[in-house]
Image (cartoon, rainbow, N blue to C red):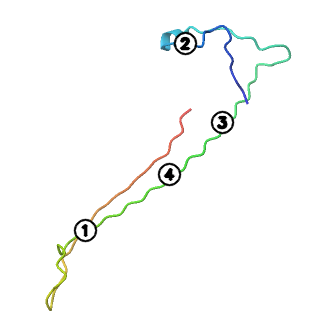
Amino acid sequence: MSSIQIRDLAHSAALDNQAMATVRGGFAGVGVGKDVNVNVNVNQQLGQFQQISVNVLNNNGVVGAGFVGPDVRLAASLWGENRAVF
């Protein structure tokens, strides 16, 4: 696994964007080439559940003969998305 180590910076120092942009330098060491191998593993899981209850009879348990239930049209939608941006 690749790593970066900064030795001459205090642990308590907080760097803003401008300070980080001025960080320079580095030493590859003996026998280390310019190629760097970086492995990134991403595991994402998305689980969704939707339950819709519509009470159309207002808890009226008694209906007469010839009862025709109301026409209830419901356009429910549910969407989800996972992203990994490097």
> Considering only order in the chain, which callout, 2 or 4, is on the residue closer to the N terminus?
2
Could you say where residue 76 lies in the image, as x and y percent from the top left?
A: 31, 61
How many numbered circles does the render carry? 4
Tell me the CA gap for discs 1 and 3: 46 Å
Residue 2: image x %, image y %?
72, 27
The reply to whether callout 1 and callout 3 are in contact (CB within 8 Å) is no
Q: Which residue is mark 4?
A: 46
The answer to whether residue 17 is above or below residue 86 is above
Q: Are marks 2 and 1 in contact (CB under 8 Å)?
A: no
Q: Amino acid at mark 4?
A: Leu
Q: Measuring 69% from the left and 17% from the top, which residue is drawn there?
A: 5
The quarter of the picture where residue 48 lies is: bottom left
* Residue under numbered circle 1: 54
Q: Amino acid at mark 1?
A: Val
Q: Look at the picture and state if 35 lies above or below 14.
A: below
Give the CA separation, mark 2 to mark 3.
23 Å
Q: CA distance from mark 2 to mark 1?
A: 55 Å
Point out the image quarter for the C terminus.
Answer: top right
Q: Earlier in the sequence, mark 2 or mark 1?
A: 2
Kindly identify which numbered label has been placed on residue 20. 2
The answer to whether the residues at label 4 and label 1 have Cβ atoms under 8 Å apart is no
* Relative height, residue 61 to residue 48 (above, below): below
